[in-house]
Amino acid sequence: MKIGVFGGTFDPVHTGHMISAVEARKTLKLDKVIFIPAFQSPHKGEPGSDTNRLQMLESAVESYPFFEIDTFELKNKGLSYTYDTVKYLTNKYAGDELYFLIGTDQYDNFEKWYRYQSLLEMIHFAVMRRHDSNAVILEPFIDVGQPVIEISSTDIRHRIKKQDEYRHLLPESVYGYIKENNLYET
Ligand code: ATP
């Protein structure tokens, strides 16, 4: 099997994530994509509640038969190092071909990742374009070549705080969950 691995904070999951995962699946001919929510990314500040992030992610992926969620990083707590996650996945899916999906912001930052050189030998990396559509993606990274979708969780959180429109930027179920639980308002 060819399996995509989509790590992220998903605070909240948005349409940019969904489109990117669907496009990457098509381009790379993946049988499925496994979303892996981080407990806490080593490169970002403390995220919102893991329970809320997971519930929103579950509601977003549930109607896609080729998407699933693995809670390895949430269960481990602490800082979520991709190196540990990839070690776990290559063991669990020995014999399968794994593709880790990242946006160009993570590609630009890649040399700051823990044990990034080893990582490149453990799993394929495929890059999804964000912001700079002309960025040159160097080998061994694979260019997914999907259209740029200018949506980020940070922008959505800001919009909610400012009471700007944001409903169109995420799945309807995630919008409902945010409203019901008054998330990101302060
Ligand atoms: P934040 O704004 O809080 O930093 P984010 O929108 O970047 O969050 P993450 O959950 O941190 O979302 O992203 C997980 C992965 O998805 C990262 O590799 C990121 O580059 C990628 N990604 C997020 N949004 C997009 C998008 N609109 N297009 C392509 N890739 C994306």
Image: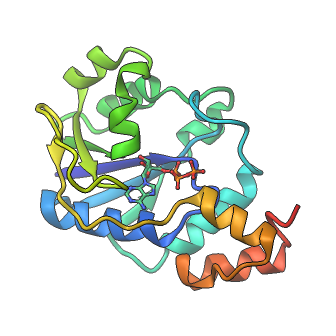
The one nearer the camera, 17 or 2, is: 17
Q: Quadrant of residue 117?
A: top left
In x, y percent, where is residue 7?
A: 45, 45
Quadrant of the snapshot with the C terminus: bottom right
The one nearer the camera, 167 or 121, is: 167
The residue located at (53%, 73%) in the rendering is 60
In x, y percent, where is residue 115?
A: 38, 14
Q: Is residue 28 left or right of residue 58?
A: left
The residue located at (75%, 74%) in the rendering is 178
The residue located at (71%, 50%) in the rendering is 50
Q: Quadrant of residue 137?
A: top left
Q: Is residue 43 left or right of residue 67?
A: right
The answer, for residue 103, to whether it is visible in the render is: no
In x, y percent, where is residue 163?
A: 79, 77
The one nearer the camera, 126 or 69, is: 126
Q: Is residue 16 left or right of residue 141?
A: right
Image height check: is 176 above or below 178? below
In x, y percent, where is residue 4?
A: 28, 51
| Number of numbered discs overlaid on the protein picture | 0
The answer, for residue 175, to whether it is visible in the render is: yes
